[in-house]
Image (spheres, rainbow, N blue to C red):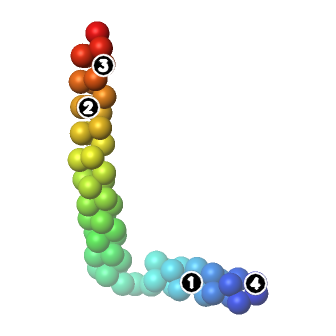
């Protein structure tokens, strides 16, 4: 368990060091990559979700 805590503490320290360093350009690129990945995940989820909602409303319409 202490190895896990050490790993988590090391990770948090590394993230803190990266965010507080003077590498602002690199940090902006990392944030840009994260935003792009979030956008891809959202777009991947919207397709099937939209189809499911369309089918649900079509079912309700036929029942009415």
Q: Is residue 57 above or below residue 34?
A: above
Q: Answer few, some or many: residues within 10 Å of disc 2's Cα (few below 14, many 20 plus, some between 14 and 19).
A: few
Q: Secondary structure at mark 4?
A: loop
Instruction: Name the residue rendered at 28%, 69% in the picture.
Output: 32
Spatial CA span between label 3 and label 1: 50 Å
> Which disc, if any, is residue 60?
3
**Quadrant of the drawing holding the C terminus:** top left
Q: In this figure, which residue is indicated by the disc labeled 4?
A: 1
> Can residue 41 be seen here?
yes
Q: Hey, which residue is sitting farthest front in the picture?
A: 63
| Structural distance between the alpha carbons of marks 2 and 1 | 45 Å
Instruction: State the SS at label 3.
Output: helix
Q: Position of residue 27 (x, y in %)?
A: 35, 77
Q: Which badge, 3 or 2, comes first in the chain's sequence? A: 2
Nearer the N terminus, badge 3 or badge 1?
1
Closer to the camera in the image, 52 or 6 = 52
């Amino acid at each position: 368990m202490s190895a896990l805590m050490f790993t988590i503490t090391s990770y948090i320290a590394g993230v803190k060091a990266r965010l507080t360093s003077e590498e602002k350009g690199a940090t902006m690129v990392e944030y840009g990559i994260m935003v792009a990945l979030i956008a891809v995940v959202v777009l991947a989820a919207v397709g099937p979700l939209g189809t499911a909602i369309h089918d649900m409303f079509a079912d309700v319409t036929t029942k009415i």
